[in-house]
Amino acid sequence: MSSNPNASRFTRASGVLLHLTSLPGPHGSGDLGSAAYHFVDWLQSAGQSLWQFLPLGDIGLGHSPYMSRSAFAGNVLLIDLAELHQRGWLDADDLTPAAGLADDRVAFDRVIAFRMERLRRAAARFAAQSTPQERAELAAFRAEHAAWLDDYALFMALSEQFGDRLWSTWDAPLAQRKTAALKQARTEHAPRIDFWVFAQWSFFRQWAALRAYANGKGVSLVGDMPIFISLNSADVWARPDLFQLDDAGKPTVVAGVPPDYFSATGQRWGNPHYRWSAHAAEGYAWWIARLRATFELVDRVRIDHFRGFESCWEIPADQPTAVGGRWVAAPGEALFEAVSRALGPLPIIAEDLGVITPEVTALRQRFGFPGMRILHFAWGQDDGGLNAYLPHNYTHDTVVYPGTHDNDTSEGWWAQAPERVRHHLREYLACDGGDIAWTLMRTASASVADIALYAMQDVLRLDGAHRMNTPGTAEGNWGWRFTWAQVQPAHAAALKRFGQLYNRLPT
């Protein structure tokens, strides 16, 4: 374990992994409304002090929260419509659910249409009848977040004008951010710019209230920050010099990972790579701003694909898969030194799964960031017990999961596991393999890892039909939801007992 004092920030605790969209609620997907507050109450009753979720930005290709159009903006689809009604910006009839909104799955197309229309109505009502105090609050928000909000709101308005086409295909003066063209666009699109500012203000207001409530109940919020940025984003459009693009705004190389457990051809994510020399020349100011903004929303954050800060898999943009990529060095130590000087020690969880070198581990430990271990990856290897995912190899600076949002549920995983995996697990844990989800949750809780986190699907003992995401597939992901009828008193009681047995209850 690192001697870095930052590592002591993570005391022994446990929590649940559940994205906001998976919460119950009447409007087609979970949001920042009453169900989120009830979930905090449930976590407290279960002795859990951490709530982890997926990135909070808007959704991109395949409805993925990892392909947001802004590294700073919130997902306006998470806005609680009932709160807008309480403020007088929506009528009661506006809250009547539309046809086709389901309790067990997010029907994204219907949800987007329904929620965006309600936001449009709320923004119009706000514009027509808001009080001076409300307008002052919005103006203060707009000024405070101007560094990213001005470009984001204009980008969203222009995206609508151009039918969500990639920004590099817009009219050249706008794609190239010519001053006169931007000034004219801000005038022409002022109403839609105001709409997007109103929507972000609504998200940030509601999020601040939820975070305060959760912290008051002893629950810390654990966010998720993708390392890379979507090509079709306000960030890349506003600062193309920070990314490896050609003169036409197209990436020369894209991000991904080589072949691994999840895919024989690797994963070609398609995000543009950073032009690290440009970031270094500015003292990593963009990263400092990004992490500062992230910690205005959450108490801790998991950085996805942390190994990309040490070296990243660079795929030529014209290659259809990740097979033809190569590892290229990245300035992890210099970047985090700059961030630490600007922001101080930060409670970061390093997602260090996949091909991990000693250099990646050294970088993580240098800054006291705990790494991740996945119990699904622990079994069936003939390596003399050296597999890093086996519990006897854990160190304290570890966050352990039975499986994450990228894994099958534990019940689904077990149903597909080969016999060598099943035999190894049964022998290692001295069990018969029954109730596998809770067997793995108990194993995680009992481990030496400082933090244990359980997917809500495992808490509910759900099978593979309830999986959140299958890496490498573009469709059919991110839609899982649960209902309160599935949650029984025994679930909270057993989780709390784990906390008592293995010293993970809040102090």
Image: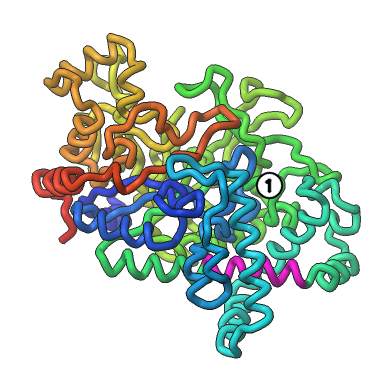
- State the image coordinates of residue 245 (x, y, percent, origin top left): 76, 43
- State the image coordinates of residue 340 (x, y, percent, origin top left): 45, 61
Quadrant containing the N terminus in the rendered view: top left
Of residues 239 and 419, the one drawn nearer to the viewer in this rendering: 419
Write down the quadrant of residue 314 in the picture: top right
Which region of the structure is painted magenta?
191-203
- State the image coordinates of residue 296 (x, y, percent, origin top left): 46, 66
What number of labels is visible? 1
Location of mark 1 (residue): 275
Quadrant containing the C terminus in the rendered view: bottom left
Q: Is residue 275 left or right of residue 439?
A: right
Is-magenta flag for residue 200? yes
Any part of residue 283 in sight = no
Of residues 407 and 125, the one drawn nearer to the viewer in this rendering: 125
* Three-letter residue code for mark 1: Arg
Instruction: Rate crowding at label 1 as few (under 14), some (14 to 19) or many (20 or more) other CA atoms within 10 Å.
Output: some
**Measured along the vertical axis of the image, is residue 196 above or below residue 48?**
below
Which residue appears at 88% of the width and 70% of the height? 184
Residue lying at the far left of the rendered structure: 501
